Amino acid sequence: MAVVGLGTMGAGIAEVFARSGIGVVAIEADPQALRAGLGALDASLSRAVSRGRLDARQQAEIRAKVRPAPGFADAAAVDLAIEVVPERMEIKRQVFAELDRVCSPDAILATNTSSLSVTSIAAATKHPSRVVGMHFFNPAPVMGLVEVVRTVLTDDSVPTAVVDLARQLGKTPVGVGDRAGFVANALLLPYLNHAAGLLETGYATAADIDKAATAGIGLPMGPLALLDLIGLDTSLSILEVLHAEFGLARYCPTPLLRRLVTAGRTGRKVGRGIYAYPDGRSAGPIGSPDDGVDVGSAGVAPATVTVIGSADEQEADLASALASAGLNVTRNAAHATELVLVVAEAGQPVLPAALAAGRAGQAVGVHLPGGLGPGALVELIATSLTSDTAVQAAAALAERLGLAVVRAPDRPGFLVGALLYPHLADAVRMAQDGYASAADIDTAMTLGCGYPRGPFELIDDAGAADVLAGLRAMYIAYGYPALAPPPLLAEHAAAGIDFAAARRAEPRPASPGLARTGPVR
Ligand code: CAA
């Protein structure tokens, strides 16, 4: 096989094939890019050796499978060529014109495009029936998903062969239609864009946004770190394609992304994006002096505290955890204490309860999206009347209880919900509109993006009614169409059925060669 383009993804894809014992012609005309790509391949293999996953002999064998080539001539004998060049249609078309000229007419020509139309790429070739999308996820050696994109021009045998090949490579293929962003990127990118927007508008710090996603939702990376991993330039290109295709504000790239790309801060690959990466490791966010400062570090924990709120069970749990930690705790708002903790629910504002307690300056909202427990996340909510001292005191208490702390404004969803609810609504809308099944969406997000549970499993865990209530509160507050609760979610909430139950009832037509039956058309 041949890989055309040896950037981050190209090198990773070459490694995936070579690890399966398949010889790879690595076509890269730019000597500097070739050196960098082979360097990335060597680093990845060395890491596997250092972790005991490969021995030195296997490393040498895999490395020997990858043969660099400066031009297309070496692709003449391959059965499959995958294009992994930058996301610009004119470059893709040039590559396919060359492959069309050089490769045998039986060879499959695949594109790893993240969002561009595979049909448009295919239509510009002499044999469009052999053109297919074979979309890997970064880091390609690690992520288990391959989206197989077929167009109306693709011969039936081609996706079947690509599906078999993906399985041979140890990946899970999901068949998807040729629509911008396919399944995973069409969901992931608006979520990442929204997170960048929260940073840009000062809603929360970079460190808190990423911590909310990892400690609060359980995702393997925060959205801002993930933007840096994918590359801000690649992310911007995908968003532009999504925005051109679907026209919704949620896809419109947040200005911060464009500015960072213009400034050359394109992410991890250049050592600078939203975060800085001296020596390849993250050294925290660039730019904002207070980003990444742990709110817990500066405060002094009080000795007396009042715990009030509307979430009865959590209120009792928190009061007893604080009492066990040696605090003098009361649940009577009339008692004079140093700090008032208002245990909040995601859709409910903190301020009315803080005002009712009569000590709004000392009142801090507390939201525990996953309940109490070691390492659980607590969102500390400052109203417009809360003093900084009160937030710092609450943070010091949370630290004493072993909780991870983020700060959030007193707005619907606080921080975790503000990130998660619109993302879940996008997933529901995608299923509701027949774009992909709930099962395929969950598979795409777990295997492609490392989610511990897919969006529909997350809804089932939280309860459709709670997600609906959170979204409704956000929609009322902001009025953006993307926040309007999708009818399918409202139906599940009203009927009290979870998506897993609906999924079990879904018809699963046998689709030749596809492990999961995606909407291959
Ligand atoms: N190349 C090869 N292997 C890598 C790697 C890389 N760049 N980065 C990590 N790994 C390997 C490690 O060697 C390690 O392997 P072993 O378990 O065999 O030792 C394993 O991955 C876990 O790595 P770490 O322990 O260092 O780090 P981690 O546990 O934090 O996991 C991660 C790192 C796999 C990247 C994880 O954070 C994750 O899943 N993140 C989400 C990534 C994601 O969403 N990708 C999709 C982006 S969208 C896309 O790519 C599509 C597009 O078109 C833009």
Image (cartoon, rainbow, N blue to C red):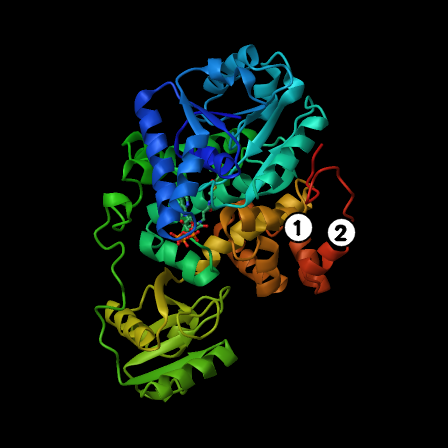
The percent coordinates of residue 24 (x first, y second) are 48, 28
Q: Nearer the viewer, residue 352 or 518?
A: 518
Residue 324, quarter of picture: bottom left
User: Contact (CB < 8 A) between labels 1 and 2?
Assistant: yes
Q: Nearer the viewer, residue 455 or 336?
A: 455
The secondary structure type at the circle numbered 2 is loop
The secondary structure type at the circle numbered 1 is helix
Callout 1 amino acid: Ala
Residue 79, quarter of picture: top right
Measuring 24% from the left and 49% from the top, which residue is drawn there?
288
Whether residue 239 sits left or right of residue 201 in the image: it is right
1 or 2: tag closer to the N-terminus: 1
The percent coordinates of residue 67 (x first, y second) are 42, 25
Would you say residue 255 is visible in this rendering? no
Measuring 32% from the left and 30% from the top, which residue is drawn there?
36
The percent coordinates of residue 492 (x first, y second) are 69, 59
Work out which quarter of the rendered image holds the C terminus and state it: top right
CA–CA distance in space, label 1 to label 2: 9 Å
Whether residue 506 sits left or right of residue 482 in the image: it is right
Residue corresponding to mark 2: 506
Residue corresponding to mark 1: 439
Q: Quick check: 122 above or below 42?
A: above
Would you say residue 343 is visible in this rendering? yes
Measuring 38% from the left and 54% from the top, which residue is drawn there?
210
Callout 2 amino acid: Glu
Q: Are there few (<14), some (14-19), or many (20+) residues within 10 Å of tag 2?
A: few
Q: Residue furthest front?
A: 57
Q: Nearer the viewer, residue 67 or 411?
A: 67
Q: Are there few (<14), some (14-19), or many (20+) residues within 10 Å of tag 1?
A: many
The percent coordinates of residue 27 (x first, y second) are 43, 22
Whether residue 302 sits left or right of residue 82 in the image: it is left
